[in-house]
Image (cartoon, rainbow, N blue to C red):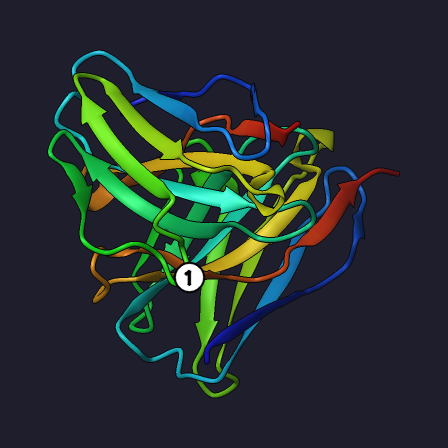
């Protein structure tokens, strides 16, 4: 099954841009990844899915246009432009693998985004 | 809109069984979705525990499969988690979540607020 690796932390100034990275383990370059935002003390919220061709399907409810994704090789990126205070959250990536008795859903370790 | 609410003991003794229930409101558990449990140890990332369809079909995380049972009660519109032989490593915030099959894309689109479970004597 794939392993998803995320840097534990990132920071950006108010109004700036930041790109968060989720890296798939070797051999899984064709996998799509889901991004989730988790504000402090809250459950996660679906942001959007990304593959090597970019966004797959629609963004989650209420996700602003400032959020975008790209995929390249083993990396899946989430970019946030014009960062706002409410963007300070943990961001998780997730993916599905296998079928039947081998089916599993996996998540990365999450990246804590601090807005300066 | 659909809402999920976890309930259950916040403290479980080591070697005991953790039992949680997720009540589904604003919609039917018999809809075409997977109903899941996900946990998050303090300061760590998310871990998928498993899921159930209203038919009773289940998928479990292989690393927890031997200790996990997820069941559904359609009459009460809720689903439940049992995790046996718990240790301190099972201390976490436990979330129930809906994996929307018919979404574009299919994804975890609704989450409960989470409930903290501590394993300690």
Q: How many marks?
A: 1
Q: Quadrant of residue A51?
A: top left
Q: Is residue A9 left or right of residue A104?
A: right
**Residue A99, position as x, y percentages in the image:** 17, 42
Number of other residues with Cα within 10 Å of mark 1, as a class: few under 14, some 14 to 19, many 20 or more? few
Q: Is residue A87 left or right of residue A79?
A: right
Q: Is residue A10 left or right of residue A50?
A: right
The residue lying toward the viewer, choosing from A39 and A31, is A39
**Residue B116, position as x, y percentages in the image:** 73, 49
At a point 21% along the width and 67% down the height, the residue shown is: B102
* Residue A56 position (above or below residue B73): above
> Can residue A101 be seen in this snapshot?
yes
In the picture, which quadrant includes the C terminus of chain A? top right
At a point 39% along the width and 83% down the height, the residue shown is: B28
Q: Is residue A94 left or right of residue B26?
A: left
**Residue B53, position as x, y percentages in the image:** 32, 66
At a point 55% along the width and 31% down the height, the residue shown is: B45
The chain that hosts pointer 1 is A
The residue lying toward the viewer, choosing from A68 and A27, is A68
Check disc 1 and report its element: helix, strand or loop: loop
The residue lying toward the viewer, choosing from A76 and B43, is A76
At a point 65% along the width and 39% down the height, the residue shown is: B85
The residue to which callout 1 is attached is: A62
* Residue B103 position (above or below residue A55): below
**Residue A62, position as x, y percentages in the image:** 42, 61
* Residue A112 position (above or below residue A82): above
């Amino acid at each position: 099954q794939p392993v998803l690796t995320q840097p534990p932390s990132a920071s950006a100034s108010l109004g700036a841009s930041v790109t968060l990275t989720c890296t798939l383990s070797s051999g899984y370059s064709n996998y799509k990844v889901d991004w989730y935002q988790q504000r402090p003390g809250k459950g996660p919220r679906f942001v959007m899915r990304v593959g090597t061709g970019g966004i797959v399907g629609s963004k989650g409810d209420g996700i602003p246009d400032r959020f975008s994704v790209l995929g390249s090789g083993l990396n899946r990126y989430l970019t946030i432009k014009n960062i706002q205070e409410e963007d300070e959250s943990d961001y998780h990536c997730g993916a599905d693998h296998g079928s039947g008795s081998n089916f599993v859903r996996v998540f990365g370790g999450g990246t804590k985004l601090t807005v300066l | 809109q659909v809402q999920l609410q976890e309930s259950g003991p916040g403290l479980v003794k080591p070697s005991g069984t953790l039992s949680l229930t997720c009540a589904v409101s604003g919609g039917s558990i018999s809809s075409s979705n997977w109903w899941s449990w996900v946990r998050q140890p303090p300061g760590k990332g998310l871990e998928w525990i498993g899921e159930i369809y209203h038919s009773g079909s289940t998928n479990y995380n292989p690393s927890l499969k031997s200790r996990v049972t997820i069941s559904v009660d359609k009459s009460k519109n809720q689903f439940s988690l049992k995790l046996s032989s718990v240790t301190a490593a099972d201390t976490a915030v436990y979330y129930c979540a809906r994996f929307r099959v018919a979404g574009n894309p299919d994804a975890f689109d609704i989450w409960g607020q989470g409930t903290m479970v501590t394993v300690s004597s």
